[in-house]
Image: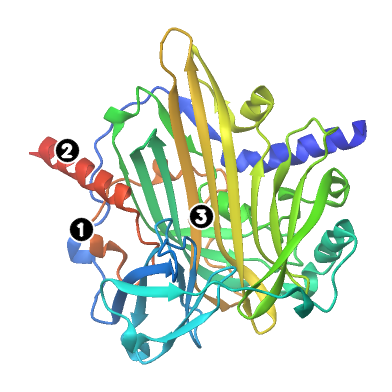
């Protein structure tokens, strides 16, 4: 086990190097608009539809439900409140939208039934009979090994150019204090290639309320590259390598359906004798192709000191900082028999224990990226000088928060209501300071 311990430690540190939080004293700077309104794109070429996806019986919102315009690669996902915004070119407004959510019956709706505001989509819970599964694996560890061996067959074997929306936020307890958003062009390498994905910043904006940061500023190193690295089928060393698989316990829990496909639910957790923090979570595996269609997992942060060393690069003087939770999600979509990365999200909560203060401080950082369009390509997106660096700190590259029409025809993830409230408050403060 000593050999694995050193190998796994090196791997995990490589993973979290793209998710480091910098902490230090800030120098407040006034955020200014990124682009003038006169440069806003023409909004007459597309139609925007807004609404929510909910459970038909309980009326509860369905977070991260997928909406795809049939016959195209245009897609979006719902936010944590089940709300969505979908922009469609005007020449495609006669089309249909497919809505899917794990464990629910798929739904297809004509765009003529969508409203520009408050479209409500009700999803029906799906019940799957065990007798529908022709083969039920007896050894769950052999199942995950088969999944990893079939990566080359199940996922894109040629590069694609993707348009994606990226967001990172910081909350102090329940209040949003920082928000950065970007439209990113991604050159996604083949899943059989060892080359890393390439990202280029197309549009971006940020808003930070420095008065709420408690003389501390957080900086996320990695930006969009962090969300791309959560693609565990392109980067298996995120969670599973051949030598790491043996350090997990696997359990085949149940079956469900998504997009009319039967899905195994495979849970995993690190074995009790493994000291190095690893992951626990669930994998959703297509029963026929053995492709992972979705994965949710968390880092084991029970060892506070070791987990803190993995995430924090610079700690404030007079305080102890450690993560209390670290959760991740990645989703895939299928096209012509091949799967591709479509969405990922990481959320880390930190506690700061001050040596000379009575109360602790809680911060929560979230990053997410959704692919909203893509096409096959062999051309790399840009010159080396125009590409984002893997260790980018997004908030150092951009400033300002423009108006709501800033994104033009590009699809974005609908912001949550508390984020919108935080943006309005920050904008009002900036307006007062600019007078």
Which numbered dot is residue 387?
Answer: none
Which numbered dot is residue 385?
Answer: 3
Q: Is residue 288 visible?
A: no
Q: Tell me whether the residue at label 1 lies in contact with that at label 3, contact meaning CB atoms closer than 8 angstroms.
A: no
What kind of element bears circle 1?
Answer: loop
Viewer-side residue, 38 vs 16:
16
Q: Quadrant of residue 189?
A: bottom right
Which numbered dot is residue 36?
Answer: 1
Between disc 2 and disc 3, whose residue precedes?
A: 3
Cα separation, mark 1 vs mark 2, equals 19 Å
Q: Quadrant of residue 358?
A: top left
Mark 1 or mark 3, which is nearer to you? 1
What kind of element bears circle 2?
Answer: helix
> Which residue carries the number 2 mark?
429
Cα separation, mark 1 vs mark 3, equals 25 Å
Question: Viewed as shown, does residue 265 lie left or right of 386?
Answer: right
The N terminus appears in which quarter of the rendering?
top right
Near mark 2 (Cα within 10 A), the count class, few <14, some 14-19 or many ≥20, is few
What kind of element bears circle 3?
Answer: helix
Q: Tell me whether the residue at label 2 lies in contact with that at label 3, contact meaning CB atoms closer than 8 angstroms.
A: no
Q: Position of residue 46 (x, y in %)?
A: 30, 80
Near mark 1 (Cα within 10 A), the count class, few <14, some 14-19 or many ≥20, is few
């Amino acid at each position: 086990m000593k050999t694995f311990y050193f190998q796994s430690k090196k791997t995990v540190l490589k993973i979290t190097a793209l998710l480091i939080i910098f902490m230090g004293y800030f120098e407040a700077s006034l955020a200014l608009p990124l682009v003038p309104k006169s440069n806003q794109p023409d909004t007459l070429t597309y139609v925007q539809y807004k609404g929510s996806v909910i459970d038909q019986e309980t009326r509860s919102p369905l977070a991260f439900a997928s909406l795809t315009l049939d016959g195209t690669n245009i897609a979006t996902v719902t936010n944590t409140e089940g709300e969505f915004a979908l922009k469609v070119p005007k020449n495609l407004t006669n089309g249909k939208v497919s809505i899917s959510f794990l464990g629910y019956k798929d739904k297809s709706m004509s765009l003529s039934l969508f409203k520009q505001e408050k479209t409500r989509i009700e999803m029906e819970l799906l019940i799957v009979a065990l007798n529908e599964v022709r083969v039920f694996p007896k050894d769950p560890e052999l199942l995950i090994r088969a999944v990893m061996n079939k990566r080359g067959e199940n996922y894109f074997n040629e590069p694609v150019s993707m348009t994606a929306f990226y967001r990172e936020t910081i909350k102090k307890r329940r209040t949003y204090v920082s928000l950065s958003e970007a439209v990113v062009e991604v050159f996604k390498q083949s899943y059989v290639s060892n080359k890393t994905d390439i990202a280029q910043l197309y549009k971006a904006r940020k808003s930070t309320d420095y008065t709420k940061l408690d003389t501390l500023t957080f900086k996320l190193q990695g930006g969009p590259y962090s969300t791309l690295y959560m693609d565990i089928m392109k980067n298996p060393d995120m969670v599973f390598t051949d030598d790491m698989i043996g350090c997990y316990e696997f359990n085949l829990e149940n079956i469900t359906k998504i997009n009319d496909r039967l899905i195994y639910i495979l849970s995993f957790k690190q074995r009790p004798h493994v000291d190095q923090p690893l992951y626990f979570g669930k994998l959703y595996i297509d029963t026929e192709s053995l492709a992972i269609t979705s994965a949710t997992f968390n880092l084991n942060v029970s060892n506070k000191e070791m987990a803190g060393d993995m995430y924090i690069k610079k700690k404030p003087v007079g305080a102890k900082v450690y993560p209390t939770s670290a959760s991740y999600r990645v989703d895939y979509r299928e096209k012509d028999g091949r799967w591709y990365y479509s969405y990922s999200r990481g959320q880390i909560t930190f506690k700061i224990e001050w040596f000379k203060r009575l109360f602790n401080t809680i911060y929560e950082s979230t990053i997410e990226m959704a692919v909203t369009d893509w096409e096959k390509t062999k051309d790399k997106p840009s010159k080396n000088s125009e590409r984002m660096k893997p260790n980018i700190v997004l908030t150092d590259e951009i400033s300002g928060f423009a108006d709501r029409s800033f994104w033009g025809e590009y699809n974005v993830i609908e912001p949550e209501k508390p984020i919108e409230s935080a943006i309005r408050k920050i904008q009002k403060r900036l307006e007062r300071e600019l007078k």
